[in-house]
Image: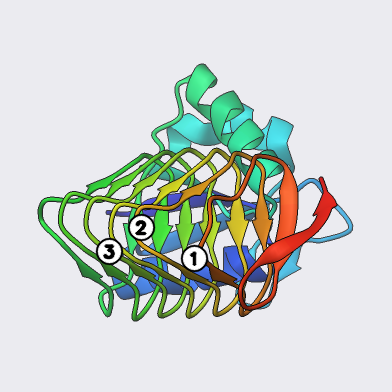
Amino acid sequence: MSKLAILGASGHGKVLADMAELVGWRSITFFDDAWPSLMLNSHWPVAGDTAALLDKFAEFDGVLVGIGNNSIRLEKQAQLAGSGAQLITLVHPAAVVSRYAHIGSGSVVMAGAVINVDVRLGEACIINTNASVDHDCVLEAGVHISPNAALAGGVRVGRVAWLGVGACVRQLMDIGAGAVVGAGAVVVKPVPPAVCVAGNPARLLCQN
């Protein structure tokens, strides 16, 4: 592992860069659509925008999208994959991941996270700090499980859904595509697609 390019130089991208150094990537370069007004991200250079990365990805041993917004992250990943970029996964050394779990390309697993046996993560997912994903869960592409959120066994989470900080989901629940589960919510019933729920127990707040 030598040269890594990360698209997205904001907070999430910085966390990924720090993780990448921990697991042995020696050189990290950011790309961000705020370039050229943004040319340095705390500790790492910003070398151009998305178009520049599409021109230069062959210079890197791996590419990762470090954008927190689920839909944009998935869109950018598809753009890079379609151009032939070498998309990687990234797992923090302090995470616990079953050898029988599947992690899709471009997905990241943060410090303290636990992913148990027969979990399937789609592409470009985020399993954030201290989140827990129990056995047989299926997360479709672009899902974000926020810090300290917990999924019991057999939960299915649809494309680009987002579970907020500390949310809990009962076993065998379905979270629909594009749904948002608020911070601290306790999900005991299926969540339809494209809605916001919150509370204990989680109740409908709005349509997305």
Give SS at disc 1. Answer: helix
Residue bearing the label numbered 3: 134
Closer to the chain start, of discs 2 and 1, is: 1
Between residues 148 and 66, which one lies in front from this camera angle?
Answer: 148
Identity of the residue drawn at 34% across and 81% down: 112
Give SS at disc 3. Answer: loop
Between residues 147 and 66, which one lies in front from this camera angle?
Answer: 147
In this view of the protein, can residue 35 be seen by the observer? no
Q: Is residue 13 above or below residue 18?
A: above
- Report the Cα–Cα distance between label 3 and label 2: 19 Å
Q: Is residue 129 above or below residue 12?
A: below
Amino acid type at image mark 1: Leu
Residue bearing the label numbered 2: 90
Dot 2: within a 10 Å radius of its alpha carbon, few (fewer than 14), some, or many (20 or more) residues?
A: some
Q: Is residue 194 above or below residue 69?
A: above
Identity of the residue drawn at 66% across and 48% down: 179
Give SS at disc 2. Answer: strand
Dot 1: within a 10 Å radius of its alpha carbon, few (fewer than 14), some, or many (20 or more) residues?
A: many
Q: Position of residue 191 (x, y in %)?
A: 60, 50
User: Quick one: which residue is furthest to the left in this view?
Assistant: 99
In this view of the protein, can residue 3 be seen by the observer? yes
Mark 3 vs mark 2: in front: 3
In the image, which disc is placed on residue 146? none
Indicate the quadrant containing the N terminus: top left, top right, bottom left or bottom right: bottom left
Closer to the chain start, of discs 3 and 2, is: 2
Cβ atoms at labels 2 and 1 below 8 Å apart: yes
Amino acid type at image mark 2: Leu
User: Quick one: which residue is furthest to the right in this view?
Assistant: 37
